[in-house]
Image: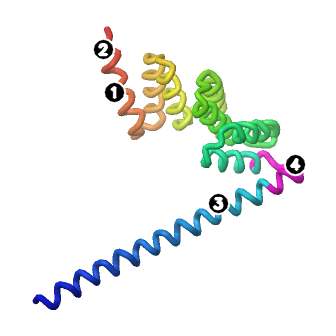
Amino acid sequence: MNEVLPVIYLSGIVVFLTGLTIFILFQIIKTRRTENRFSKLQEKLQKERGTPQEYYDLGSLYLDKKLYVQAVKLLEKALKGKKQIEPENVALIYNALGYAYFSQEQIDLAIRNYKEAIRLYEGYAIALNNLANAYEKKQLISQAVETYEETLKYDPDNKVAKRRSEALKKRLVESS
């Protein structure tokens, strides 16, 4: 029995390290693909005019890197070609633009873009959640609750909207 225990222990360590190695390799591959896409898009858009989709894709990559000023510029370029895109996809761009502004503490601009996204794509739960969050940041609690409730009309299982709506309702009751 004493001889089996070290073998089990070492086997566990080998399995754990193998799993960790595989996980790290997949992360490296994923990061390389993203960086490849990033550099190819960057090079292409520096040399020639791109499609709205390409500007949106590069803008999204900048958002992932938390480079919000650059993302705003690219997302605005994507909007210049919005006549070529379906309204639902334009709504995605406005939502991303709202997120970029929100991340820069430009809440009024964020709200304007979230509202435009919702106008173009009624029931866009992510934009509704983002709008409610922006209202919350501006201390517009009743509008935030109303917007979270609207999110729940379109997405009844939205955990963020449920949790935030309940918490804000409690705050409203306590302050009354």
User: Residue at point 49% right, 28% down?
Assistant: 133
- Disc 2 and disc 3: Cα gap in Å? 47 Å
Task: Name the residue type under label 2.
Answer: Val
From this view, report whether residue 67 is shown above or below residue 154. below
Number of other residues with Cα within 10 Å of mark 1, as a class: few under 14, some 14 to 19, many 20 or more: some
* Residue labelled with disc 3: 34
Number of other residues with Cα within 10 Å of mark 2, as a class: few under 14, some 14 to 19, many 20 or more: few
Per the image, label 2 sits on a secondary structure element best described as: helix
Regarding residue 165, the answer to whether it shows in the image is yes
Question: Residue 30 location in percent, x, y?
Answer: 58, 65
- Disc 4 and disc 1: Cα gap in Å? 47 Å
* 86 displayed left or right of 171: right
- Disc 1 and disc 2: Cα gap in Å? 11 Å
* Residue labelled with disc 2: 173
- First in sequence: mark 2 vs mark 4: 4
- Disc 2 and disc 4: Cα gap in Å? 54 Å
Number of other residues with Cα within 10 Å of mark 3, as a class: few under 14, some 14 to 19, many 20 or more: few
Numbered mark located on residue 49 in the image = 4
Between circles 4 and 1, the one closer to the viewer is: 4
Question: Residue 174 location in percent, x, y?
Answer: 29, 14
Residue in the foreground of this view, choosing between 117 and 1: 1
Residue in the foreground of this view, choosing between 7 and 77: 7
- First in sequence: mark 4 vs mark 1: 4
Quadrant holding the N terminus: bottom left
User: Residue at point 89% right, 51% down?
Assistant: 48
Question: Residue 110 location in percent, x, y?
Answer: 62, 27
- The range drawn in magenta is 43-53
